[in-house]
């Protein structure tokens, strides 16, 4: 990153203050390694029938949603929900295994500092090498 990119980390709430079971250094490692949106994070959910995924962590106004007409509920939900920001507590809970969270790497100014790709099946090594050969990842590449 050049000097102009330092603004990316200005005011980052997750790297300041806080106490708890994880070190400040550990809590800083995540936002420094994976610069992402600070105003929202993804929370993992799982249903009884085994379906799982990630959704933005948010507080919903269920009263407003339930009082609206069925055809308007999605619009009301979208208009009234309040996204939860990334905090030291969110990162600490993730590091301690209390909650599985994710980040949204596309920043509001449409920059992105990292890309994660998941390669499965028997051909994962071939697929990963093909991906690297495309030159998308640039110089900073890690396969794990």
Image: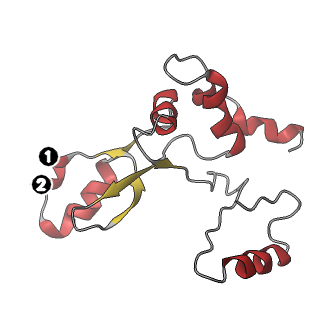
Residue 116 figure quarter:
bottom right
Residue at 75% of width from left, 36% of height from top?
A: 7
Q: Which mark is residue 63?
A: 1
Q: Secondary structure at mark 2?
A: helix
Q: Quadrant of the N terminus?
A: top right
The reply to whether the C-beta atoms of the residues labelled 2 and 1 are less than 8 Å apart is: yes
Q: Which mark is residue 66?
A: 2
Residue 130: x, y in percent?
A: 78, 81
Badge 1 crowding class, 10 Å Cα cut-off, few under 14, some 14 to 19, many 20 or more, is few
Give above or below for 24 relative to 93: above
Please indicate whether residue 54 sits to the left or right of residue 6 in the image. Answer: left
Comparing 100 with 78, the one in front is 100
Q: Secondary structure at mark 1?
A: helix
Give above or below for 133 relative to 74: below
Residue 84: x, y in percent?
A: 41, 39
The residue lying furthest to the front in this view is 122
Residue 58: x, y in percent?
A: 35, 45
Residue 40 seen in this snapshot: yes
C-alpha separation, residue under disc 2 versus residue under disc 1:
5 Å
Residue 12: x, y in percent?
A: 63, 30
Residue at 52% of width from left, 28% of height from top?
A: 88
Give the image's coloring scheme.
secondary structure
């Amino acid at each position: 990153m050049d000097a102009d990119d330092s603004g990316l980390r200005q005011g980052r709430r997750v790297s300041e203050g806080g106490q708890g079971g994880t070190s400040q250094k550990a809590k800083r490692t995540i936002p420094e390694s994976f610069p992402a949106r600070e105003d929202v994070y993804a929370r993992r959910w799982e249903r009884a029938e085994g379906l799982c995924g990630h959704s933005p962590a948010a507080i919903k106004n269920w009263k407003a949603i339930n009082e609206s007409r069925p055809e308007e509920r999605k619009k009301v939900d979208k208009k009234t929900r309040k996204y939860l920001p990334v905090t030291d507590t969110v990162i600490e809970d993730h590091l301690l295994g209390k909650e599985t969270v994710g980040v949204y790497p596309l920043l509001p100014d449409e920059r992105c500092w990292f890309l994660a790709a998941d390669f499965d099946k028997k051909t994962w090594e071939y697929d990963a090498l093909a991906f690297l050969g495309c030159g998308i990842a640039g110089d900073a590449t890690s396969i794990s």
